[in-house]
Image (cartoon, helix red, strand yellow):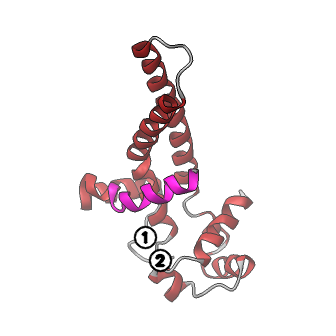
């Protein structure tokens, strides 16, 4: 739990969102960021976005390995080879990665919005379910895929 809180602080240090600049200010280091977040939002501010982060990672890794195994098994059936060439493994991994990104992007959108919302604002999300409901009602399915090309690039470069 503490690791997640520190990662949020580190993420906020380098975040140039209007909230980070105007509300939370510039942070000098991780400990300063943690101090300021606790001062403004309370200790729970360090854990904003924890539920979607856990859900997103569980979904992402579960669907990735399931997708990879399914594609690899199908390639083994089609080619008749038990031991596949490395290019087939790359194809299975790429297919699984794209499917995972499509399936989990809504969770990452919710996580980002929950982490960077203005503390105490009347329009703040009260939780994961509240965020899902409000995004769906106000933006529809498109709201869950805002910035998906940006996240796809970041996600793929971080896994490499």
Q: Is residue 61 left or right of residue 43?
A: left
Instruction: Report x, y in % for residue 124.
Output: 43, 70
Mark carried by residue 118? 2
On whether residue 93 falls in the magenta region, the answer is no
In this orientation, which residue lies closer to the viewer: 120 or 11?
Answer: 11
First in sequence: mark 1 vs mark 2? 2
Query: Is the residue 32 above or below the residue 72 in the image?
Result: below
What residue sits 45% from the left and 83% below the top?
18
- Total marks drawn? 2
Instruction: Report x, y in % for residue 109.
Output: 42, 59
Q: Secondary structure at mark 2?
A: loop
What residue sits 71% from the left and 82% below the top?
32
Q: Are marks 1 and 2 in contact (CB under 8 Å)?
A: yes
Mark carried by residue 58? none
Q: CA distance from mark 1 to mark 2?
A: 7 Å
- From the image, tell me which residue sits under label 1: 124
In this orientation, which residue lies closer to the viewer: 145 or 91?
Answer: 91
Query: Is the residue 17 above or below the residue 53 in the image?
Result: below
What residue sits 56% from the left and 46% below the top?
57
Instruction: Report x, y in % for residue 68.
Output: 50, 30
Q: Secondary structure at mark 1?
A: loop
The residue carrying pointer 1 sits among few (fewer than 14), some (14 to 19) or many (20 or more) residues within 10 Å by Cα, namely some
What residue sits 53% from the left and 22% below the top?
84
Residue stretch in magenta? 145-159
């Amino acid at each position: 739990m503490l690791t997640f809180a520190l990662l949020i602080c580190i993420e906020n240090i380098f975040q140039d969102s209007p909230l980070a600049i105007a509300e939370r200010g510039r942070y000098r280091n991780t400990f300063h960021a943690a101090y300021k977040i606790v001062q403004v939002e309370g200790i729970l501010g360090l854990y904003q976005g924890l539920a979607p982060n856990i859900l997103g990672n569980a979904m992402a890794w579960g669907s990735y390995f399931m997708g990879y195994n399914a594609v690899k098994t199908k390639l083994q059936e089609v080619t008749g080879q038990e031991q596949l060439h490395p290019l087939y493994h790359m194809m299975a991994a790429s297919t699984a990665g794209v499917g995972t990104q499509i399936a989990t992007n809504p969770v990452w959108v919710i996580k980002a919005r929950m982490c960077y919302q203005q503390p105490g604002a009347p329009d703040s999300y009260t939780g994961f379910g509240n965020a899902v409901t409000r995004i769906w009602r106000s933006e529809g399915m498109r709201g869950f895929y805002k910035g998906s090309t940006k996240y796809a690039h970041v996600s793929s470069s971080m896994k490499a």
